[in-house]
């Protein structure tokens, strides 16, 4: 297997570089041929690597970056004022092909702006999209995009999201013929707004997409589609609402369990079994949204990710890079554009 | 207390008129001064009333309707082809002021179309909105609108949703100064699309609205706002996605519990306590979306509502009618329009 190098933004995220180093330590074992460039404050990183006994590791190097993008920085500001941020340096490593992929837990808006600036879109790609995997009823995952890179989309952009999402579902989820759906307020042709209806027509005309029609919100997790397309406003609000509901449900269930001494005892005794449910509900292993359509692999980890979650994001980056996902996307977009001529 | 009359569409919904009659029986006791007109197939209703010992009840009358709107009927079709549907007859009773409110579990699209046609909007109201109460973290509820009546909205319409929702929150939720928020993909002024930003400006300028800014999806249930405004596309998809996630979480938790004999035993023993969580999660008592902005009270019950859920929808209709919610909304809209001149 060819040598793969990943750039890790160590300074992004709420929990600082220590969780990145902790995740790195595990990743070095899990992925024995991958090299890592840890980007950020050199002194701080060296100290953490030393504590983790990774100072002399042959597959770990440091790239110094003097600035950090704060969670409150506006994207435009960070682009102008922080050219030497760990996020930017990590992205430049991918742009210069010194790394195949980059993982950052930093400010999403800044990451999307900087990534677009540094990496540019693949030939033919109109807009990059933020894409995540969501769990499905009978197991497995589906991809949803866009989750916030583009609040307003036209029908050509939505169509391309379906094309890119399909490639990702084939390569990363291993689904031979991914079912693509458009998120809508009803299943009938007449439902929704003009952009969604026009996008549906484009999907129906394309031989490259296995389009299955409109999908309503309550079927998002139902296992009916493998790639679910929407604009960034709807996608962002919908998925964040789900996160909010999950929090509410969990705290309510916990409160009900803790309200009675006998149920509390039960929980202590069967903690592990219940933990499996909690984990699945706030699954660390789903951590990691990818910014697809760019000339390199960029994975966005949750700002408050712990080491295990960050490790999951690293695994996603490796998977996408090993499968040359950007190239695969480029080829498919080219084929689709030829078909449309 | 003045006599209030409710029209109940007995034929809408998946579970037929029997659950409506069951709900009616309880409602007659809970609300000892309210009269009910049960709308639908006279023979069938008479038979059910007889079984429920309600045939001679002084506060129950039947209004015959020869047609039923099917769940698959397109709104336009049902408007033209089914003038004698139970749904339409029930709405006409409100339009003619023979009833103060109407409750239907039928096809939402048809209900919104027929209600708009029969009842018209209040003076000054641009568009009616479908509004529901959602649970909040520390208890209590918040109203969300629009949930599907208007897939595309301009900023004036969104602003009015905030005005109407505020009135409802004051009258129905008893909140003196409801906090109004706009659903968005971020909190900063720069986030979102043009319509949302323009609506924000309108809210900021109005003395009638306690506007608290943008609210992200993951704060929908967080107790930060009392009235949450969005267009019908976003609202519908977001809330339906939450329903889908709740289903997924519950089935996953159940599966984990049932996988082990000891946890199954536990569930049997403490069924009631757990049931409280399940109930709260798929709460029947939240059943009932209202179509506000019309010249009468219209409550939409879930299509698959059971008797308890339908009873809850009846209670909502009574509450709104007793507080003359349409009149209150009319007055507030008028004040706001004066302010804007």
Image (cartoon, coloured by chain):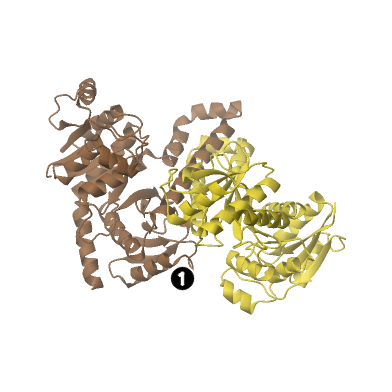
Chain colours: A brown, B yellow
- Rendered image quadrant of residue B292: bottom right
Which residue is tagged 1? A189
Q: Residue placed at 84% from the left, 51% from the top? A: B32
For the residue pair B22 and B165, the one nearer the viewer reads as: B165
Which residue is rendered at x = 39% and y = 40% of the image?
A283
**Residue B53 appears at what percent x and percent y?**
83, 59
Which residue appears farthest toward the front when viewing the image? Answer: B341
Q: Position of residue A42 (x, y in %)?
A: 20, 26
| Badge 1 element | loop
Q: Nearer the viewer, residue A293 or B200?
A: B200
Image check: A89 left or right of B41? left
| Residue located farthest toward the bottom when viewing the structure as drawn | B81
Please identify the quadrant where the C terminus of chain A is shown.
bottom left
Tell me: A218 left or right of A18: right
Please say whether residue B172 is visible from this viewpoint: no
Q: Position of residue B12 (x, y in %)?
A: 66, 65
Q: Is residue B95 left or right of residue A202?
A: right
Image x and y of residue B327, in percent: 73, 57
Chain letter belonging to callout 1: A
């Amino acid at each position: 297997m060819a040598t793969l190098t990943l750039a890790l933004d160590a300074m992004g995220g709420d929990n600082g570089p220590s969780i990145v180093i902790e995740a790195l330590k595990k990743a070095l074992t899990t992925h024995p041929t991958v090299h890592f460039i840890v980007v950020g404050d050199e002194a701080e990183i060296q100290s953490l690597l030393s504590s983790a006994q990774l100072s002399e590791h042959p597959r770990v190097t440091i790239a110094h970056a003097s600035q950090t993008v704060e969670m409150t920085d506006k994207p435009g500001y960070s682009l102008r004022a922080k050219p030497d941020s760990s996020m930017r340096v990590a992205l430049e490593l991918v742009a210069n092909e010194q790394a195949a992929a980059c993982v950052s837990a930093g400010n999403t808006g800044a990451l999307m702006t900087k990534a677009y600036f540094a990496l540019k879109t693949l030939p033919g790609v109109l807009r990059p999209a933020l894409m995540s995997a969501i769990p499905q009823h009978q197991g497995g995952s589906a991809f949803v995009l866009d989750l916030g890179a583009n609040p307003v989309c036209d029908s050509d952009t939505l169509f391309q999201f379906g094309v890119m999402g399909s490639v990702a579902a084939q390569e990363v989820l291993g689904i031979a013929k991914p079912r693509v759906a458009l998120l809508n307020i009803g299943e009938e042709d007449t439902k929704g707004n003009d952009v969604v209806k026009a996008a549906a027509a484009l999907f129906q005309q394309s031989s490259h997409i296995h389009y299955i029609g409109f999908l309503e919100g309550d079927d998002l997790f139902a296992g009916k589609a493998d790639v679910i397309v929407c604009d960034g406003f709807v996608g962002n609000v919908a998925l964040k609402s789900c996160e909010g509901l999950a929090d509410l449900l969990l705290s309510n269930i916990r409160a009900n369990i803790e309200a009675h001494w006998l149920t509390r005892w039960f929980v202590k005794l069967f903690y592990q079994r219940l933990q499996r449910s909690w984990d699945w509900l706030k699954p660390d292993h789903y951590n990691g949204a990818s910014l697809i359509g760019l000339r390199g692999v960029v994975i966005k980890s949750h700002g408050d990710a712990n080491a295990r979650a960050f490790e999951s994001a690293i695994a996603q980056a490796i998977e996408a890079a090993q499968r040359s996902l950007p190239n695969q996307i480029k080829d498919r977009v080219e084929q689709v554009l030829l078909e449309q001529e």
